[in-house]
Structures are given as structure tokens and as C-alpha cells.
Image (cartoon, rainbow, N blue to C red):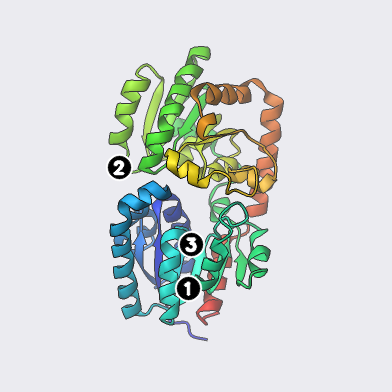
Amino acid sequence: MDNTPPRLGMVAGEASGDLLAGLLLAGLRERWPALQACGIGGPRMAAQGFESWWPHSKLSIFGYVDALLNIRELLSIRKQLGTRLIAQAPAAFIGVDAPDFNFGLEQRLREAGIRTVHFVCPSIWAWRAERVEKIKRSADHVLCLFPFEPEILRQHGIAATYVGHPLADAIPLQAPKAESRASLGLAPSDTVVALLPGSRRSEIRYIAEPFLRAAVLMQQQRPELRFIMPMAPGLRALIEPLVARLAPGLNLRLLDGRSHEALAACDITLVASGTATLEAALFKRPMVIAYRMHWLNWWRMKGRNYQPWVGLPNVLAREFLVPELIQDACTPAALAREALAWLAEPERYAAVQARFEQQHQMLRCNTAQKASDAIAQIIGQA
């Protein structure tokens, strides 16, 4: 057995990928303290000693329109990155989510003899089943966050391991509500609503406005409500003018980052579909899931989903545990109505928290250890 600390290539796009990759790197460093890793990443990866050749913000785009607008730069980065990784020949490459960027890179690296791992199975069980052939060409192994995914992949001849979700390990079973409220200057008696419109600039453009307008409607009906909005790095300049224009009198505090504190402190949340919905469930916070996008992206995606659910808590439950308001349904009035309903129905509130507790227990299985075990097997250092 070779115990030499490996050098790994990695790519994580946007804030959610950086979060997952940072947690994964922490687990890998427990096995190999002198591990070296390089590629594309963000601040959470950097905190684990990751060498970032390009910032993860370069990949923080969504949908066909944004991709087309940035395609030349993205293809150039991917080509340069692939050439550099092939020259350095890492023990393995780990693509963390960002499938549209990573699959092409993984295929090139795999053809050059570098072992490839994809961390986060694309939601082929939800939509875009054609991606399964891309996975087959690109990844030697897939690390899956959800228990039903490995069998789906094995049916297509793709090696996969269920590793659970690192957020389920990182987030405590009992949310530190009192401590988080104290750190954010909120009183124990406050009724707090967290607004999480997303971390991409496109999400702020399309989702922040109905969230802010909904908050104004909610405050008109419940003047005692307090609102908090965590912001991803670099988005304050985009959000502050929106707040000034749409909700100048709103009892709102903008937070630089601190999304986990916001979720721990709040009573309910309006949240954009994505990883943040799972984070909200792990913090046991009733939510309203929403999403809006450019009309062309919506036209391309509409009708290609294979199940009625979009939000991860609902996908895991196989039912609508929480409301989903997507595209035209994502109106300020509907958001306000569904959010206030959680505060008016304590039995429903408690019931969904109990279901979130079950989901947390299911996903909590020491992901970093399982993932590092699988990666050690793949590179021959088990």
C-alpha cells in the first residue's frame, strides 16, 4: 500500500460546489495531511489548502442564455485547465458538481489516463436522462449524495458509491437557534424570516425581486416580522439597490455570507431551489421553495422533468412536504401567502420539522470518511 500523499485535481463551481468540496477536502486531509489539490475552487476550498488557478465564480452561471454569453471564456478555461492537469498528472481528478463544465474535462483527462471521480450525481432521475451517457464516458466513479442514486447508475454500467451528504454531517441535528439569534442581534421572541434568493447573479436578477416584494406584503400583514438576507460574496452591490427601490421600509438586515446562521436563527425561509433547500431542511426550517429564470431557459427546460418535485426535501420525501412556486407561479402574493401559512399552522409546522429530522438522520453517515475511502480505492491507496 502506497501512503504517499496524493496530488489531486479538482473543480467546483459556485458557492454550493465550494461548500461540498471544502467539506470533502477536510475529510481527505484527515487521511492524507500533506495532500495537495489544485484546479478551480472557492474560499472554503482555499481554507483547506487548495491551490486555485481560477476562482469558482467563473463557473457561477445558470442556464443556456448565461452559458452562451460566457461560452468562449469557459471553453478557454477548460482547455487550459485540462492541458495543465495532464502535464502534472494528478493521482485523480474530482469534479464537484458543475456537470456541464466538468464532464467534458473529465472525459479528456480520462482519455489521457487520469482517474476521474464525479462528486454529486447529476439529477438524471429528475430530468435530462441523456446525461447518463456523458457520465459513462467521463467518470470512472460517481460519489452519490442520495441513497437511491447508485442503483440507477449501476443499471447503466457506472460504478458509484453512496456517501451521504456532507452537509448532514456538518449541520448539527439540533440547530443552534438561540446562539445564532444572539450573534445576529435578534431577540428570542422575534419572528424571523430568512430570504435566500440564491448565490448566482442571474438568481438575484430573477428571484430577489419577488422575494423582496413578498416580504413587504408579509410585513404589511405582520408588522412585527423581522427579515434577514444572507448574500454571497460580491452580490451586495447588486442587492442593495434592489432593496432601496423595492422595499425601503422593510425591517431587513443584509448579511455578508452567514447563511447557516440565518437558517439556524429564522422561523421560516423563502429559498431558491438548489442546495439551500436541503440546508434549510437540515436546519429543520419550514420553507417556501421558489425559482424563476430567463424565459428562454424556462422554455428549454419545461416539460423535460420526470417527476413533479423540484426542491430536494420534496424529492427525498417523494411528496410535496413544502410548497414550490416555480416561474410564473413565483409571485409576491403567492410567496407571502404560503410563507405566512407556516406561521399560522403550528401542527403542520411541527410535522414538517419531524420529517426533516428523518431526512437528516438518513443523510448523516460520515460523508468525508466514506468519500475518502472510495477515492483511496480508486487511486490504489486503500
* 243 vs 355: above or below: above
Q: In this view of the protein, which residue sits in the foreground, 1 or 61?
A: 61
The residue at which mark 1 appears reads as: 116
Q: Total of numbered circles in the picture?
A: 3
**What x and y, as percent, mark residue 381?**
51, 81
Helix, strand or loop at label 2? It is loop
User: Residue 234 got which mark?
Assistant: 2
Q: Give the position of the C terminus as an image quadrant.
A: bottom right
Is 363 displayed left or right of 208 in the figure? right
Who's the residue at 42% across and 67% down the image? 104
Label 3 and label 2: CA atoms lie apart by 25 Å
Mark 3 vs 2, N-terminal side: 3
Amino acid found under the numbered disc labelled 1: Thr
Who's the residue at 68% across and 24% down the image? 346
Who's the residue at 41% across and 61% down the image? 101
Label 1 and label 2: CA atoms lie apart by 32 Å
**Residue 52 shows in this picture:** no
Helix, strand or loop at label 1? It is strand
Is 125 displayed left or right of 67 in the figure? right
The residue at which mark 3 appears reads as: 24
**What x and y, as percent, mark residue 129?**
59, 58
Mark 1 vs 3, N-terminal side: 3
**What x and y, as percent, mark residue 158?**
60, 71
Neighbour tally class for label 2: few under 14, some 14-19, many 20 plus, Cα within 10 Å:
few
Q: Are marks 1 and 3 in contact (CB under 8 Å)?
A: no
**Residue 164 shows in this picture:** yes
